[in-house]
């Protein structure tokens, strides 16, 4: 299971027992979108090759507020 923890500067990720950070700039480059408009599903796709997506995607700006 992958755990994503969002803040205004990026995302802390726990993936297969490994913890790492995805900075806001890296996420914006990977998605070609402004960080507040990126969805949790898009971040999960950066981390996992074929993620299991459930529920509606949520934008970072909605998660943080």
Image: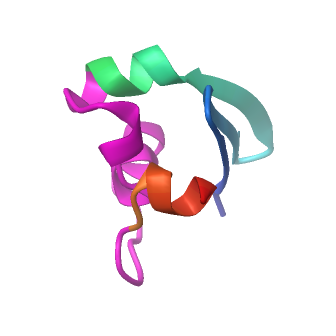
The answer to whether 13 is drawn above or below residue 23 in the figure is below
Q: Where is residue 43 in the image (x, y as percent from the top left)?
A: 43, 45
Q: Name the quadrant of the C terminus.
A: bottom right
Judged left or right of residue 47, residue 4 is right
Which residue appears at 39% of the width and 57% of the height?
59
Which residue appears at 38% of the width and 59% of the height?
41
Judged left or right of residue 20, residue 24 is left
Which residue appears at 78% of the width and 34% of the height?
19
Residue 15 is a magenta residue:
no
Which residue appears at 23% of the width and 32% of the height?
33
Residue 47 is a magenta residue:
yes
Q: Where is residue 49 in the image (x, y as percent from the top left)?
A: 36, 46
Q: Which of 47 and 58 is in front in this view?
A: 58
The answer to whether 37 is drawn above or below residue 53 in the figure is above
Q: Position of residue 55 (x, y in %)?
A: 40, 84
Q: Where is residue 5 in the image (x, y as percent from the top left)?
A: 70, 49
Q: Which residue lies furthest to the left in this view?
A: 32
- Give the extent of the magenta segment: 30-57
């Amino acid at each position: 299971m992958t755990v994503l923890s969002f803040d205004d500067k990026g995302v802390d990720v726990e993936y297969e027992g490994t913890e790492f950070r995805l900075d806001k700039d890296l996420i914006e480059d990977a998605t070609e979108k402004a960080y507040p408009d990126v969805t949790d599903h898009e971040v999960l796709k950066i981390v996992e090759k074929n993620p299991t997506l459930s529920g509606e995607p949520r934008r970072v700006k909605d998660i943080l507020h």
